[in-house]
Amino acid sequence: METIVCIVQTEGDGSLAKAALEAVACAKELAAGLTAQFAVGLLGETVQPGADALANCGASAFFAVSGAAFAQARYATDAAAVTALAKAAGATIVLGAATSRLARVMPGAATRLGGVSDASVTAVAAAGGKPVVTRWYYRQRMFAELTRDARPWVVTIAPGCFAAYAGAGGSAAVTGVTPELAAGGARTTVTRIISPSGEQQTIRPDAKLLFVAGAGWTKKQSDGAAHAGEAEKLILNFLNKSKASLGTSKSLIDLSGEGQQVMSFLTHMHQVGQTGATPRHPKGLATCCHGEEPHVVGWRFIGERRAVNLDANCGWAQGKADVLYVADAFKVMAKVIELMG
């Protein structure tokens, strides 16, 4: 019989982020399908609040690696912690969210455990008494369903693929685990954390809306001049009011290499599409984008897609958008901001 452990990282206050709760929901669903037990392994400086939030999730046990040494992401300590948690649970299947912290250490933990690893899977289910995972390939143009006989099997789950666990909290009994660290294994020292303010942070994975700015924002407009400065103000104003997440096409980011103006707040991290990210927001609004396939492939998992473009024959009009507004994005967004007060 399979034994499952779900590894979750706690936040600074000991709580659990949405991605962690999604991983717990995945573990709970898989355990039910396999008629197996699942445990929860917590990692962070403070873990009791997170454990209490999951007290009634159905986990058979709670294990934790905690303390100041595990407050921040660090490969040596995190990989040792995941390894220790998996061993403590006697796990044959190790699940965890594909967050920036866990994604980089789970494959290493699989090697230490003598197991195998699959990263960023989008579905986990039981079929014929075996666990089956789904992974997308070729920039989300095709997917495969995989199963493995080797154990332990370490799997990271792409955020946004499961509904987050939302059960009632309680009081959970947590068993502390002490990982084995090699001599000099924690050489990295975290001196301080520098993070942008809420207004400066424009990539918001949990936002309900993805707003994508295309290259058209920096091109010459109807008066024959470019208005990149005005475009920046409009876009940032809308993002601050709507709390949407910002994306862009590769063409806009690379315009600087062509000697054209580029919006100062856009980076390669904002890319959506074949060479960028594949977000999973409930709604998406593309502005001044032509809806070409390399860009639109990044919208595969967006629930409702709308676009604003002056070209009625652009790619968005060819069945790639649910609604296409043939209009000037400058005027449309100015009016939207006005209506938002």
Image (tube, rainbow, N blue to C red):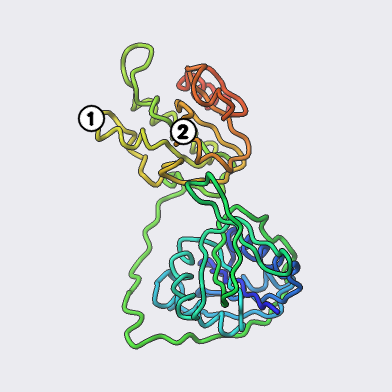
Q: Residue at x 54, y 32 (%)?
A: 285
Q: Quadrant of the N terminus?
A: bottom right
Residue 254: image quadrant is top left
- Frontmost residue, 210 versus 149: 149
- Numbered circles on residues, count: 2
Q: Where is residue 184 shown, x and y percent of the image?
A: 32, 85
Q: In this figure, which residue is indicated by the disc labeled 1?
A: 259
Disc 2 crowd rating (10 Å Cα; few below 14, some 14-19, many 20+) is some
C-alpha span from label 1 to label 2: 26 Å
Amino acid type at mark 2: Asn
Q: Residues within 10 Å of mark 1 (few under 14, many from 20)?
A: few
Give the number of the mark in front: 1 or 2: 1
Check the image and report above or below for 135 versus 247.
below
- Residue that mark 2 sits on: 237
Residue 273 position in % (x across, y down): 46, 40
Return the mark for residue 175: none
